[in-house]
Amino acid sequence: MLERFFVKPETIDRIRASWIGEPIERYVAWLTENGYSSRTIHRRVPILMHFGAYARASGTKTWDDLPAYVASFRDRWTKDHGQNCKTKRALKGVSNEVQNPIQQMLRLVVPGYAGPGRPRTSQDPFPSYAPKFFEYLREERGLQESSIRHYGHYLRRFEAYLREINLHNLHELSPPVLSAFVLKDSQTLSRSSMAGLCSSLRVFLRYLYRQRLLEREISRTVDSPQRYRLSSVPRSISWDEVRKMLRVIDRRTPLGKRDYAILLLLVTYGLRAREIAKMALDDIHWKEERLRVPERKAGHWTTYPLSPIVGEAILDYIKHGRPQTSLRYLFFRVLAPYHPLTLIAVSTRASYYLRKAGIPVSRPGSHTLRHTCIQRLVDANFSLKIIGDYVGHRSSSSTAVYTKVAIEALREVALGDGEAVL
């Protein structure tokens, strides 16, 4: 494998003669399999050679001892090669440039090595006190995994708060403790997130009482914030702003081809980011000119007519932007390793182009374009039932919020004297 990237025999001999020559060669093979460029391999192999020499000089004798030297080598390398960095961000880039290849190589050769990073919390909070709570959510309540993840998210916050106040026995839970926790989180969470937190907390407390893990029923002391139906205005943008956003995409590059297709899917069909991320090649039926969207939030699937503009954008990406891979997912990262795009990445790309186009909108993201699609259908006088079915709403109340104001008319009032719309 080394002969593929290094021309001089002495260079190959020097790498293989190193005491970590075998791990380096395995790492080069892994980089090749995952689509990394020759330039990347030429840049990373010398770093690994320096790391091996540093670790050997520091006294290490086996590959299993290498993780202990990652941090010190990274700091030394960053100090030596980051002298011209003028910002902390640039210095961080130098640090990552040396640390990432070392960690990737060690994951291949050191069993169980995960590397430093954000500590992983248990998937299920309170594993020793209420180990079967999430089993109860799945089997008795029949909740979907997406809903169960929300329970885990909120209850981990509760678990962390109890550790913070040194309350380790849930028998000591009391209404004042619950109130203090809710008040603390209300300073950082939105009203809708607080409603989800309080709801999850009440279900958890009722379960503890039912299992005799609490002596008294205290779930009723957790009050959700008051929410008013139709109290917010959807954060949609005008169709002229959609065109402005699409014009700032550089469609000459693989990245631009991919993002152009994604944004068209979002604004044409009102899809969610998770639905874009899960989309596969098999969901596009070219002969029938149909687009299938499986695993929607409401548990069903939808088939749409494939718009010619959307179809051309997807085809352009498949032919000239999508990496060569055996996986059937439609959208991938443009840089190695070529993993399927995540829902967070989809929303981030939408946010990026909204900001780049200078379009003012609160909390920009993929849902901005979903709201725009729905608002356009409302303005075209489609019924709420048709609109709800089109975008995959589980309830008509989710669609009704778009009917309470004339968005385009309000924009005209805001931009002018408003007399034309009176």
Image (spheres, grey):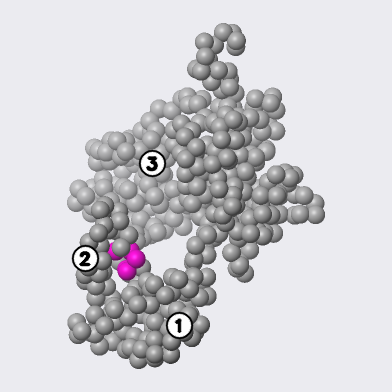
Residue at the image point whose x is 54% and y is 11% from the top: 418
Q: Is 98 inside the magenta-drawn segment?
A: yes
Q: Earlier in the sequence, mark 3 or mark 1?
A: 1
| Residue 60 position within the rendered picture, expressed as x and y whole percent measured from the top left | 23, 84
Q: How far apart are marks 3 and 1 (CA)?
A: 56 Å
Tell me if residue 111 can be seen.
no
Q: Is 364 inside the magenta-drawn segment?
A: no
Q: Earlier in the sequence, mark 2 or mark 1?
A: 1
| Residue 72 position within the rendered picture, expressed as x and y whole percent measured from the top left | 21, 71
Write down the region rendered in magenta: 95-99
Residue at the image point whose x is 59% and y is 52% from the top: 252
Would you place residue 331 above or below residue 78 in this image?
above
Q: Distance between the residues labelled 3 and 2?
A: 44 Å
Would you place residue 11 above or below residue 257 in this image?
below
Query: What amino acid type should be assigned to the residue bearing mark 2?
Result: Lys
Residue matched to label 1:
6
Q: Tell me the SS state at disc 1.
A: loop
Depth check: give the residue in front, 293 or 410: 410
Residue matched to label 2:
79
Residue matched to label 3:
197
